[in-house]
Image (spheres, rainbow, N blue to C red):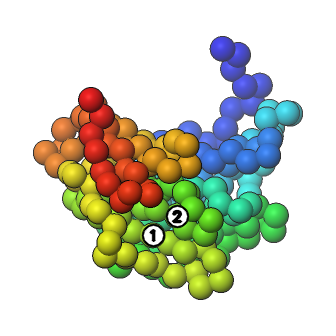
């Protein structure tokens, strides 16, 4: 692999990166002093140069983020006071601006967020929960907690998620209910509203 010609403006961990149209956005996280930050850095993949963008409203790490319709949505996270956050923010890529959105019902870190349907972002896991919440990115900009959605079979934190064939949400690894790193994977069938474990 070839290293980038320019280092990121700051050393960070527990940040989140989202790619869009030739750019990579690196948001939040913790710096070398273990302080939460609200910075946003944009890397141009063509020139390999970094630009400092508008900061988030909240300094945080270990949050979930997802790209949806030329906006980046940020959910929850952990702050300097060791508190789980319930905040929700949206970044307009076109305008380089952030806006606060309705808060989640509970504050947690280690969420997984993934966009599946036309207007909906699914939030799974985080902390000690196994529920599935839905944020509507349409005109209402509201949280839903549909009672018909099946919970994950087990609590899961810091897992990776991906959508396959536009109908399967796959949660990979993370920390389980015993706070142990796990290789287990769960698959949620959106159409059938059913969770299953991988063989």
**Disc 2 secondary structure class:** strand
Quarter of the image for residue 101 reads: bottom right
Quarter of the image for residue 136 reads: bottom right
| Classed neighbour count for the residue bearing mark 2: other residues with Cα under 10 Å, few (<14), some (14–19), many (≥20) | many
Q: Which residue is identified by label 2?
A: 121
Quadrant showing the N terminus: top right
Q: Which residue is identified by label 1?
A: 134
Q: At 73% across and 67% down in the image, what residue appears?
A: 92
Residue found at the very far top of the displayed protein: 1
Residue 171 is situated, as x and y percent measured from the top left of the image, at 38, 44
Residue 80 is situated, as x and y percent measured from the top left of the image, at 39, 62
Mark sitting on residue 39? none
Please give left or right for residue 14 compared with residue 194 in the image.
right
Q: At 37% across and 76% down in the image, what residue appears?
A: 145
Residue 46 is situated, as x and y percent measured from the top left of the image, at 85, 33
Residue 71, visible in the rendered structure: yes
Residue found at the very far front of the displayed protein: 192
């Amino acid at each position: 692999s070839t290293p980038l010609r320019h280092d990121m403006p700051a050393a960070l961990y527990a940040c989140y990166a989202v790619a869009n149209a030739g750019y990579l956005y690196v948001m939040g996280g913790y710096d070398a002093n273990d302080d939460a930050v609200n910075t946003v850095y944009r890397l141009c993949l063509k020139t390999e140069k970094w630009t400092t963008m508008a900061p988030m409203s909240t300094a945080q790490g270990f949050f979930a983020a997802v790209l949806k319709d030329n906006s980046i949505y940020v959910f929850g996270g952990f702050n300097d006071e060791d508190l789980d956050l319930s905040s929700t923010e949206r970044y307009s890529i076109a305008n380089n601006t952030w806006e606060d959105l309705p808060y989640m019902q509970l504050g947690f870190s280690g969420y997984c967020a993934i966009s599946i349907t036309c207007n909906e972002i699914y939030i799974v896991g985080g902390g000690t929960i196994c529920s599935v919440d839905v944020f509507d990115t349409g005109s209402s900009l509201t949280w839903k907690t549909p009672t018909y959605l099946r919970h994950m079979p087990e609590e899961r934190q810091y897992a990776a998620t991906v959508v396959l064939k536009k109908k399967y949400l796959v949660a990979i690894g993370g920390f389980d209910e015993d706070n142990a790193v796990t290789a287990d994977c769960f698959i949620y069938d959106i159409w059938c509203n059913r969770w299953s474990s991988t063989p």
